[in-house]
Amino acid sequence: MKLLAITSCPNGIAHTYMAAENLQKAADKLGIAMKVETQGSIGVENEFTEEDIRQADGIIIAADKTVDKSRFVGKKLLVAGVQEGIRNPEALIQQMIRGEVPVYQGQGNGEGTQVKTGAKQQNAFYRHLMSGVGYMIPFIVVGGLLIAIALSIGGVPTPGGLQIPEDSFWKTIEKLGAASFTFMVPVLAGFIAFSIADRPGLAPGIIGGYIAANGSFYGSEAGAGFIGGIIAGFLAGYVALWIKKWKVPKAINPIMPIIIIPVLSSLIVGLAFIYLLGGPIAQVFESLTNWLAGMQGASSILLALILGAMISFDMGGPVNKVAFMFGSAMIAEGNYQIMGPIAVAICVPPIGLGLATFLFKRKFHNAERESGKAAFTMGLFGITEGAIPFASQDPLRVIPSIMVGSMVGSVVAMLGGVGDRVAHGGPIVAVLGAVDNVLMFFVAVIAGSIVTALMIKLLKKEQIEPQLAGASAVDEAAPTIETTRADHVRPISVPAAEPHHEVRKLTDIISLDLIEPSLSASTRDEVIDEMIAKLNAEGVLTSSAEFKQAILKREQESSTGIGMNVAVPHGKSVAVLKPRVVFGIKPEGVDWSSADGTPAKLIFMIAVPAENKGNEHLKILQMLSRKLMDDAFREQLLQVTTKQEAYQLLDQIQ
């Protein structure tokens, strides 16, 4: 038997090569001929030829990012996560040997066979959801910012709300923004379904999302919002996937993905929302509206709490719309004290989350921190939808946080006698003169936003960089190295970085003086200091403090403890003059927050100049990842007692 395998992880560094190494070792052990193609940050290596594919009895894809499968139509194809390739490579190969893998038929056969484990199922759900959210975010940003610009420049306070004159140029800009928002929920649902069922799921997902967002299909003014879009996306995806599994005559197979699956899936999802889901939701919202109207004279504080919670619960969705329409109705009756707390609650979620990304950066990955800027801006113009990207990715922590913040802001506004004469929210209405008691309005907004940010700090876990295709947060232990800049002007006398020399083996960039067989430090940060001191003594660094900043910045994004008692802290900085690696051993181990919970005993610190050409850091990580998958090699390293013994073993890494 001859097998092919592809390994790839979201950042294309350590786990790509760890999975490749373990699959190759397992194949050798079982007497199976195998060729492994790696799709890492350096690029595709050991790429399959047409002859390789023709001769192969099957293909294993161990990846947490999208891999093109079009080359493998007509071949047995097994799809699993990269962690399965690392932890259970023999099981994957045995599944191939037993013939328990279907032949890949292209788009009509979906994603192939997935390894069925609890963790994998959870990752699959996250992957599908993030696929939809990723495609939705640009529509939120475009729509929100265009509407915000149009309102701020062309908006005029009127008894019916903040409006832009029909003959104004800014009305056209507002319509462009509104058009972008119109696509938001359908795109979310469509690409969730696409992630589940490939192209056959796209049309029913978009159609289902449109119906979910358009309450006129089932008698609701509010619609089902982005929560309905998520439900529609998963429903459409799994319905399409179910239909794809039908056994049909070969003559019908070609039209299944382009006609039969989309049509039937769209019918099922659309009718389910119109006749099963939409009607009951509309009745719930009508009851909520009547209930709120009956509460206004009973307890203003309780009413403010309820309105604040409703406004922030689904961020522009149906629950939000019920509270908003209630406030708008009160304006028509001359009661502006209801819309005041609502106007505060509308802007607190995006402003509070934007504030949290500024104050508590470790709680968010880089993309979220960038989204925080847009969210903050949207909040200033009363666009609650700016909080949706955060809530979609971590609803159990973000939604309670923004609800508490909005409730606090609403209560402060109610107690402060804040009124709003237009059906809109955010500081923009105060600037345009539509708010009564402007000072207390801003006090309420600030209070609610600060509470939201503090709740995020309390509830939200520290984050790592987002994973493509929904990989789990711990699946990639060594993402791309960050670059650090100096914060001051360097003296002219600082030596220049060494010319670029290709690294062929680890001992090209390590010396006896950069090896410590018995580290004395007892904590992670102390180990980092001890290893940086060795680099400094070798004349590798111009600033120990600056290089440490690069190392710690990398650790903040995600632990570099890759598991199996190994840690690979690394930094790319202008403070580094030449690529070097420090190796240290800590027999009793140091807590490094490794993915598998093991303490770090073998520690490799990689230092790379910021301006160094080539991909030294990637090549070094690749070399280390492959060799450190060898249990015997790791055990040998743990047993060394001298620098010379360690150097001789490290000379094998190439």
Image: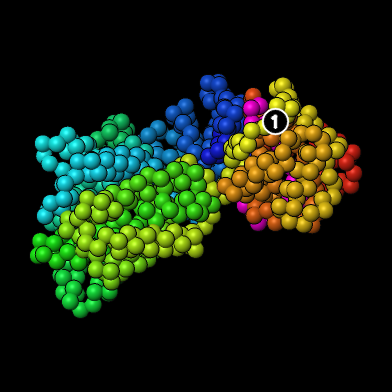
Residue at the (28%, 33%) spot, across then down: 258
Residue at the (10%, 61%) spot, across then down: 332
Question: In terms of image quadrants, where is residue 248?
Answer: top left
- Residue 9, percent across and down? 55, 39
- Residue nearer the viewer, 460 or 645: 460
Report whether residue 556 is seen.
Answer: yes
- Residue 341, percent across and down? 26, 64
Q: Is residue 633 left or right of residue 173?
A: right
- Residue 70, percent across and down? 44, 28
- Quarter of the picture containing the C terminus is top right
> Neighbour class for label 1 at 10 Å: few (<14), some, many (≥20)?
few
Secondary structure found at label 1: loop
Vertical placement of 503 versus 12: above or below?
A: above
Report whether residue 497 is seen.
Answer: no
- Residue nearer the viewer, 142 or 45: 142
Residue at the (23%, 77%) spot, across then down: 299
Q: What amino acid is found at the position of numbered circle 1 in the picture?
A: Pro
Q: In this view, does 498 lie to the left or right of 236?
A: right
- Residue nearer the viewer, 357 or 568: 357
- Residue nearer the viewer, 69 or 224: 224
- Quarter of the picture containing the N terminus is top right
In the rendered view, how is the structure colored? rainbow
Q: In this view, does 60 lie to the left or right of 345?
A: right
Question: Which residue is outermost to the bottom?
Answer: 298
Dot 1 corresponds to which residue? 491
- Residue 314, percent across and down? 30, 57
Residue 39 within the segment the image draws in magenta:
no
What's the magenta region?
595-612
Vertical placement of 581 versus 556: above or below?
A: above
